[in-house]
Image (cartoon, rainbow, N blue to C red):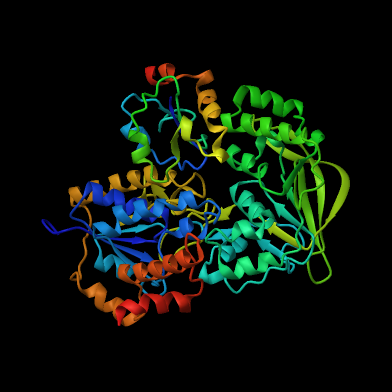
Amino acid sequence: MAGERPRVAIVGAGPAGAFAAASILRARGDADIDLFERLPTPWGLLRGGVAPDHQEIKRLEDTFDRQTLRRGCRFLGNVEVGTDVSHAELMEHYDAVVYATGAQTDKSLGIPGEDLPGSWAATSFVGWYNGHPDYRDLEFDLSAERAVVIGNGNVAADVIRILTLGPDELAQTDIADHALEALRASNVREVVVLGRRGPAQAAFTSAELRELGRLDGVALHVDPADAELDAVSREWLAADGTFTARKNVELLQAFAAREPDTGAARRIDLRFLCSPVEIRGEGRVEGVDVRRNAIVREEDGTLRARPVGDEVETIACGLVLRSVGYRAVPLPDVPFEERRYVLPNEAGRVLTPDGRPLPGVYTVGWIKRGPTGILGTNKRDADETVAALVEDLAAGTLAGARAPREAIDALLAERRPDLVSGDGWRAIAGQELERGRAEGRPRVKLASRAELLDAANAVRS
Amino acid sequence: MTYVIVGSCIKDDSCIEVCPVDCIHPKPGAPDFETAEQLYIDPGVCIDCDACVEACPVDAIFPDFELPEKYDYALELNGEFFAELGTAERTAA
């Protein structure tokens, strides 16, 4: 391997994988990087997660493109590692493999009725409105006037806005056409948001919370009794509260003091200190049973929500979106830490079950650290992993790729004749942007695998 | 004037790297860095050089006189972030 260009495979072309590729190229400009992606399109949650009305954040894709694909990193889309090509095969063809597969599934609530038709993981709704090909055929029943969102973090804020923004406003974004059409016919007039803990512990960022209070034609309701802090939370906020938590409380108290806006077309009802105990309905969702909580301080000083009283309130609704967090899934033939749902690792070096580094195997992003942080968090996370990788390359401790460089191309051509290259992706993006220009929108997404592959194929033939 | 960071900040620290007067906080490693939802510019220290504007990958930094209406709160918010712990204390550590 000495004197040769290092060969690195990154598995997953989301933000963590993109930041890792950029970081490797900064540290080792001579590296040959292949960016594997299960979908025909790169940039993961930047394309499929970030809400369509937050276009400014999607500009990050220009930076990703400039720092990775434009610098020689290859995009290998529509290839699933673990299915089309195995971990062992990657280890034969590359000096290092970096897993950046994210957290692909949802945490569950563990309450009866969670799986009733009409009860969905919020992330399925997100994938659907963002044109993720795996979710395009889902059908959300928007015929009832009330929807319930469980959880009050950033994904919750996104789905609340998409359910309450007017269709004309959504039509100016790159929301998937099938979702726009369904939302135009939506009967949803009220979204009730359930937070297990109190206003001081809301998971929203203050920017997202502020935004919910400023939507055109949408009334935001907070019960003044809910906005009042209990003694435990008041003490916690004063002593340990973050800047965001203090801002959130200020905002929620200001919302609670607002005159009711009875003329608004839609309404958001933010509730606190209540947990769903059952999702009910005959054959489909008809309501959610909730019980009150109080904040208590544990012996170790942490605050928890504990149920109080036996009173159960039923909130009638036709749609439930559960947004209580993401969870990673194990990858074939790679160690997995079952309790924390991450790849066991030390500063990005994946570890064997007995705690030793698995030579040449690295990890970055949510599958490394768990589903925390925001987009930019992945930059520093990637720098940490890449520092380890570059150190190992320099030390010569890696076994190194055994197969010649061209061999992976032959293997992929055989396994995935419909692989989407960087040029294929540019053809997809070109078509989407062109359609967008014609409609005065940032882009119009191709939202099925067939359409995406057709667009990509246009350059191959 | 001063530059102002708005809520679409992704906490990619490109701006911190280019700021010549170290007025963008919290910095990686600071106790409140991980919990911060965005970065903030200290209006009392900013020298209006616009290096951060160029560096920001999501265009989340504006001059105070050109803040879009939806971010009209942001000037005050950036200032308020430094009310308890200013740039001087933050960079002295």
Residue lying at 66% horizontally and 72% vertically, measured from the top left? A139
In the image shown, does A371 or A353 lie closer to the viewer?
Answer: A371
Residue lying at 68% horizontally and 65% vertically, measured from the top left? A184
Q: Residue furthest right?
A: A311
Say how many tags the image has: 0
Is residue A358 shown to the viewer in this render?
Answer: no
In the image, is A83 to the left or to the right of A69? right
Quadrant (top left, top right, bottom left, bottom right) of the N terminus of chain A: bottom left
In the image shown, does A169 or A257 lie closer to the viewer?
Answer: A169
In the image shown, does A346 or A53 lie closer to the viewer?
Answer: A53
Position of A378 relative to B2 (above/below): below
Residue lying at 64% horizontally and 34% vertically, measured from the top left? A248
In the image, is A424 to the left or to the right of A176? left
Quadrant (top left, top right, bottom left, bottom right) of the C terminus of chain A: bottom left
Q: Position of residue A312 (x, y in %)?
A: 87, 49
Q: Position of residue B15 (x, y in %)?
A: 37, 36
In the image, is A159 to the left or to the right of B56? right
In the image, is A379 to the left or to the right of B66? left
Position of A391 relative to A456 (above/below): above
Q: Position of residue A142 (x, y in %)?
A: 73, 65
Is residue A453 shown to the viewer in this render?
Answer: yes
Q: Position of residue A396 (x, y in %)?
A: 18, 52
